[in-house]
Image: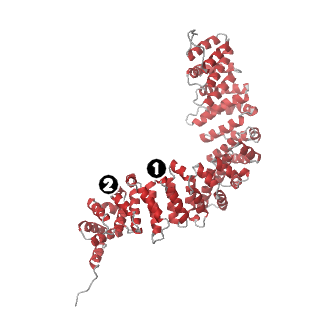
């Protein structure tokens, strides 16, 4: 019988069958075969076998890759990438599979694979460019050494050029290349601020915007582009540049399209990141996005499934974020008739705590102008906020909600015309009901509300300042070291109660509660406003109830504190004059021997001592204040 006749490829088919007999053994044998064989087709066959073995579902590719690679294999693969007689597409694919192993990424950089792979990006062969992008993307994944190597060879420009060329390419598999090239861009730029900024500077955002415009119906590509934009906007520079492009408007267009629902959550999350820029806030507020978000929230009303709740949260959080910009807030307020404003008021009455919080935050943001505040109070917003706080006293309190409501009330209490109305509506009593809390963030906010309410309101200041229990708590809060905000607000409120009530009863209550040392400490504050507030309060007390204050002033070394301020040449003239006015009142109401003693002490503080005829007359405001003070004592 004659022998069988086989095709010319029979020899290579036998090799394939032999190497695939056992995946692990096949991989080892393929590597060994690749190291010793010289034939082009045989080498290509070995590479193909390795690819098939590494991409099998039951293969631990990372472990396998680490066990297979050595310097000889690196040399063989590098040689094949440089010789177009080989199937360079498969070689690039093998590098991509091997580079999935974290431990091999840096060696691929050290073995100079990056320049060879970047060269393949210039090809018109879609398959080859695809595998080169895969290889480079895997090498750059969480690997700054790889990213820096690509960057040093102007790889960012090479990649963007490839993306430009492929933008409208209709060739077979071009859609896959676009996705993988965007993935490479993501891995190249993610968390690497220098490369992010370089990519942005040479037009990456504008190019990605074109990709969204052109390919928004392709879910995979659209999702990858969204991730790329998010990566580039990770830095402050990127956020600023996004506001100078049409990316935000394009995102709205994609979201509102029929295909937009597939990437709805990703788009909303990206918008929230981009909207940290005021320019983007303004752009988004001027589109139909806010109205769409309102409809989205309305569509989830009453639904308790996790998906609906998540959408509700994303949409309401995004709207609240837009309200933090001045211009965008005005746009959405719409003179009190904007859909977002009207809807956010309804959220205050919602059964959803998250919407209640969003509603309170929205009101607080709308209440950033006196005109809005007056209108909001006249429309009954305060009653709704009070109801929310009162409900918190009847169940387990939500700290975030309390914080949001108190923030809104504080803003509403800033216009002078609103203050008496808020007091009459019961805001002070409602806020005081929260003073039992031990949550610093809530205490900080409630103190801010009370301080705004007593501003210019004599009766409110008297009522609060003569409440023994509250004053004791207030002084205790002045001692809170772990929260500087609470300590600062508490001390300022002490001063404001004195200034606005001008009541001897309030002053004596403050002395009995132990508040004097905190006002004296406040005189040395680094904040000029707080220094002035403390000095005004102490001056009012020294001119009215000095006898009740003397012991406390002596014990807390008030004279020494004032002396330190006077000796400091950086002290502003208005602070200096207020210090001297306080000293004058202390001297005037003290024993007859005190003025001369204070005068000598003051001269020592100012560094002058006895008059010297050889010296020039006073020339500075500091000098004039001192001379005026001394003359007033005569």
Image coordinates for residue 193, horizontal then vertical, percent:
46, 49
Residue 262: x %, y % from top left: 56, 65
Instruction: Name which quarter of the figure residue 513 lies in.
Output: top right
Q: What is the crowding at mark 2: few (fewer than 14 residues within 10 Å), some, or many (at least 20)? A: few
Residue 435 visible here: no
* Image: 210 above or below 449: below
**Secondary structure category for the residue under label 2:** helix
What is the distance, in whole Å, between disc 1 and disc 2 at their CAs?
23 Å
182 displayed left or right of 256: left
Q: Which mark is residue 193?
A: 1
Tell me the tag on residue 45. Answer: none
Along the horizontal axis of the image, is 96 left or right of 345? left
Residue 437, percent across and down? 63, 40
Q: Is residue 630 above or below residue 281?
A: above
Viewer-side residue, 111 vs 339: 111
Q: Which residue is mark 2?
A: 110
Q: Residues within 10 Å of mark 1 (few under 14, many from 20)?
A: some
Among the two numbered marks 1 and 2 on one chain, the one whose residue lies closer to the N terminus: 2
């Amino acid at each position: 019988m004659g022998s069988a006749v086989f095709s010319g490829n029979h020899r290579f088919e036998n090799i394939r069958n032999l190497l695939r007999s056992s995946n692990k053994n096949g991989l080892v044998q393929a590597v060994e075969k690749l190291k010793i064989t010289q034939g082009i087709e045989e080498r290509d066959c070995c590479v193909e076998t390795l690819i098939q073995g590494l991409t099998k579902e039951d293969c631990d590719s990372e472990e396998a890759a680490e066990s297979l690679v050595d310097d000889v294999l690196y040399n063989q693969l590098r040689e094949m990438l440089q010789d177009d007689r080989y199937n360079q597409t498969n070689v690039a694919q093998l590098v991509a599979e091997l580079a999935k192993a974290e431990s091999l990424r840096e060696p691929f950089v050290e073995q100079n694979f990056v320049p060879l792979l970047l060269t393949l990006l210039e090809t018109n062969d879609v398959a080859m460019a695809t595998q080169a992008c895969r290889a480079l993307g895997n090498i750059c994944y969480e690997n700054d050494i790889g990213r820096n190597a690509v960057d040093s060879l102007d790889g960012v420009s090479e990649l963007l050029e490839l993306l430009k060329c492929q933008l409208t390419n209709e060739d077979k598999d071009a859609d896959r290349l676009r996705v993988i090239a965007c993935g490479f861009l993501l891995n190249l730029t993610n968390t690497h601020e220098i490369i992010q900024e370089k990519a942005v500077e040479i037009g990456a955002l504008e190019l990605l915007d074109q990709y969204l415009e052109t390919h928004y119906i392709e879910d995979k590509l659209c999702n990858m582009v969204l991730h790329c934009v998010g990566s580039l906007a990770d830095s402050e520079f990127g956020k600023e540049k996004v506001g100078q492009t049409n990316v935000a408007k394009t995102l709205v267009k994609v979201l509102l399209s029929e295909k937009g629902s597939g990437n709805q959550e990703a788009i909303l999350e990206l918008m929230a990141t981009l909207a940290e820029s005021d320019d983007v806030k303004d752009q988004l507020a001027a589109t139909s996005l806010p109205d769409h978000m309102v409809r989205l929230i309305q569509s989830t009303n009453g639904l308790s499934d996790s998906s609906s709740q998540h959408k509700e949260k994303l949409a309401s959080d995004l709207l609240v974020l837009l309200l933090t910009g001045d211009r965008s807030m005005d746009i959405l307020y719409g003179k009190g008739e904007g859909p977002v404003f009207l809807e956010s008021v309804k959220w205050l009455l919602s059964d959803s705590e998250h919407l209640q919080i969003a509603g309170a935050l929205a009101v607080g943001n709308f209440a950033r102008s006196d005109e809005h505040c007056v209108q909001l109070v006249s429309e009954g917003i305060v009653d709704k906020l009070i109801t929310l706080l009162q409900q918190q006293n009847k169940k387990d309190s939500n700290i975030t909600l309390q914080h949001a409501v108190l923030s809104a009330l504080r803003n509403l209490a800033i216009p002078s015309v609103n203050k008496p109305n808020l007091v009459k509506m019961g805001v002070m009593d409602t806020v005081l009901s929260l003073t039992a809390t031990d949550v610093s963030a809530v205490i900080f906010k409630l103190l801010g509300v009370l301080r705004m309410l007593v501003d210019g309101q004599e009766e409110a200041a008297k009522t609060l300042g003569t409440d023994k229990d509250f004053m004791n708590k207030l002084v205790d809060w002045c001692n809170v070291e772990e929260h500087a905000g609470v300590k600062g607000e508490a001390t300022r409120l002490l001063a404001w109660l004195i200034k606005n009530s001008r009541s001897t009863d309030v002053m004596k209550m403050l002395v009995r509660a132990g508040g004097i040392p905190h006002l004296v400490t406040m005189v040395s504050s680094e904040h000029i406003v707080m220094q002035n507030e403390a000095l005004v309060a102490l001056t009012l007390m020294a001119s009215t109830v000095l006898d009740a204050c003397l012991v406390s002033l002596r014990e807390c070394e008030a004279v020494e504190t004032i002396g330190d301020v006077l000796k400091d040449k950086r002290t502003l003239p208005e602070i200096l004059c207020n210090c001297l006015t306080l000293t004058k009142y202390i001297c005037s109401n003290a024993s007859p021997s005190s003025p001369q003693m204070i005068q000598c002490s003051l001269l020592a503080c100012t560094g002058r001592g006895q008059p010297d005829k050889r010296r020039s007359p006073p020339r500075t405001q500091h000098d004039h204040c001192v001379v005026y003070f001394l003359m007033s004592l005569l």
